[in-house]
Structure formats: C-alpha cells, structure tokens
Image (cartoon, helix red, strand yellow):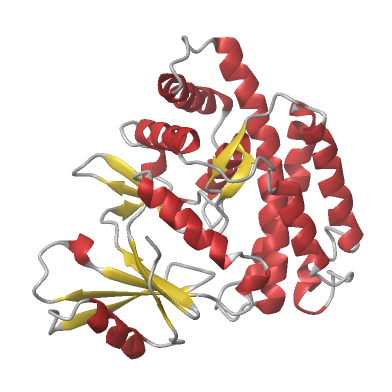
Amino acid sequence: MAVPHKNITINDLDAGKEIVASLRPTWSAIKCKVFDAGITNKLFGYIDESCTDKNEMILLRIYGKNTSCIIDRKRELETHLKLNKSGFASPVYCTIDNGYLYGFIDGNTLTAETVRDATIAPIIAKSIAKMHCSVPITSNEPIFYSTLCSWLAQLPDDLTSGKLVVLENIITDKSTLLGELDALNSKITGNSDLQIGFCHNDLLLENVIHNANKQSISFIDYEYGNTNYLSFDLGNHFDEYAGVETVDFSRYPDETYQKWWLKLYLEEVHTQKSLGPVTDAKVDELYKEVNFFSLCAHLWWGIWAAFQTLNSEVDFDFAGYSRLKLEEYFKQKVKFFDYL
C-alpha cells in the first residue's frame, strides 16, 4: 500500500500540528514536543491529551538543509517501510515535500552506560543479528565505497582552510582522503569472504531504543540504511560507544568484550539461518573484520562531518567532529588496517 503524500512544506511546530490534526481528526487537544538530539534533521512530536499510550504519538521529521545531497530520501522511506514490515520500525503515516510523519517508539535511547549493561547488550547484539538476517536487500552492491566517492566529489579540493581549518594538521587536501578510501577498498575487494546484507549504517547510541518493559530493542533514523558489509555495521556500532556530543574513544570496547558480544551476535545469526554451533575461530575471524571496518566507519563519518560543516545549518560543531573522527582513523589505522 502506497504511503499518502501531502503537497506541503513544513518548517515549524504549529504547521506540523495542522497536518497531524488531519491525520487524527478525533484529536482535539494536541500537545507538541521538540526533540533536539538529532544533528541532521528537525524532529517534532505530537500527541493528544486524551492519549494514554506514548506509542500513539506521531513524529514529524523535517529534512535538514542540503541533506538530499548526501541522503537518498526515497531510499530512506523505503528502508523505513522495510524495517516496519520486519518488525524493527514504527509505521509511516504520510510524506510531505520536505519530510514525513511516522509512529513513535516508546523506550530510552542508549547511553554510554546502558549500551554495556550486561542485560541490555545481549539484546542489542541479537537484535542487530536479526535485522541483518531478516531485512531484504534490493541490491547486492555494498554502498561503502560508492557513497564515500559521492560525498568526496561534492567537497572542494581544499579541506584545510575556512570552516575546515581544524583539519590542516591532519590531511593535506581532498586527495589524502581519496587515497585512504582507495587503500581501504583495495583491502575489502581482495577479500571475497565478507558477508553483505542490509545494514543500518548509523548505529549510534541515540539510534537504538531500549524498551525496559518489553526487554526489546528497536532502531530509528534510517537515512543511511542500505546494502553494506555486515561488519561495517558492527564496527561502526562499537565506534559509537564513544558518544557524539561528548566523544571519549577510551570507551571503545576491548577485545574480551567484543568477542563476548560478537559470539552472542553470531549465535543469533546461526539460529536465524539454522547453522551449527559458533566456533572460537569464527568469533576470532569476525573480530578482525569488525575492527578493520571500525576504521572504515571513522573515515565515513569524518568525511560526512566535513560535508556537513560546509552545508548544514544545525547548531553542532561538525568541523570539530570531523577532526576527531579523522584523528582517530589515523591513530587506529596503525593497529587495525592489516586486520583484513
């Protein structure tokens, strides 16, 4: 069933309230809320005073300025619908010219503490495994290399002056990043055993929702969801233990923790695919892949943040974030580049 579309552009809370009223004509006392955790889009929430269940809330996502240059919004919607059908996302109610409206998922976003909780972490590992196994893909081509090539093509050659002057001691110009990307891709294409499938590609803590009552995990924000190397999703998730607003890379999980977590992930994959027991050798192999792809994720978000520095109107230090990610990439490259 096609998602209804309304030919309207919305940029403020009150205008959103009107369209929500058209979707819920019985609502007579609509309350509004601004969610301010996002750094790419605007997000508003609407619910009637008569509602007793938070899941009745309707969310309005308004796309950030110039984000269509790096985000395929049609694909984002398709991904949301696929995840909803597979049980990992809320329903979509309608689209507008600069965003769409969809359901709320009750729960708490992860924190640096809860992501490591001994009762929550296994649910996260198993939920990601289920997503990787059950969400269908429409292409067998991983997006890692092509996406970064596209983003770099839209950046100027000079990435060390103006708003990006903070990068001057890390890279010389855009060719530095192109060279790093090609080196990573050469490693990847030389390994035919890498597993591909549907990946969220942005499993930061704020995009993972834990419902304590149901002991369940859900995923939100699907802008980058697409076919990719499954180990990229896992390496990126481990990177995100460091946080976004306050980044602390010392939170990156150590080998013992990762192998414990990855074994839980693999056990769920084997359950989903009716495979045999998970061996230590399989865990060791995945551990090396994941840490290599953690490098790929640092480069990914370092380039992304450079683009956002030059284009976004969101109040966030994208240039500083780009510097942090690229510094960590070069620091960890010494250790992890030869893991693949």
Residue in the image at 77% along x and 34% along y: 188
Residue in the image at 42% along x and 55% along y: 81
Q: Is residue 243 left or right of residue 287?
A: left
Q: Split into 4 quadrants, where in the image is the C terminus? A: top right
Q: Is residue 94 left or right of residue 142?
A: left
Image position, residue 310 (x, y; %): 72, 77
Residue in the image at 20% along x and 65% along y: 56
Residue in the image at 27% along x and 53% along y: 107
User: Disc count in the image?
Assistant: 0
- Say if residue 46 shows up in the picture: yes
Tell me where residue 290 sits by quadrant.
Answer: top right
Image position, residue 39 (x, y; %): 52, 69
Q: Residue furthest front?
A: 1
Image position, residue 117 (x, y; %): 35, 36
Q: Nearer the viewer, residue 77 or 210?
A: 77
Q: Is residue 264 left or right of residue 162?
A: left
Question: Is 85 drawn above or below residue 186 in the view shown?
Answer: below
Q: Split into 4 quadrants, where in the image is the N terminus? A: bottom left
Q: Nearer the viewer, residue 55 or 317?
A: 55
Q: Nearer the viewer, residue 134 or 245?
A: 134
- Say if residue 111 shows up in the picture: no
Question: Is 129 drawn above or below residue 136 in the view shown?
Answer: above
Question: Is 146 drawn above or below residue 150 in the view shown?
Answer: above
Q: Nearer the viewer, residue 228 or 214?
A: 228
Tell me where residue 332 sits by quadrant.
Answer: top right
Image position, residue 66 (x, y; %): 64, 77
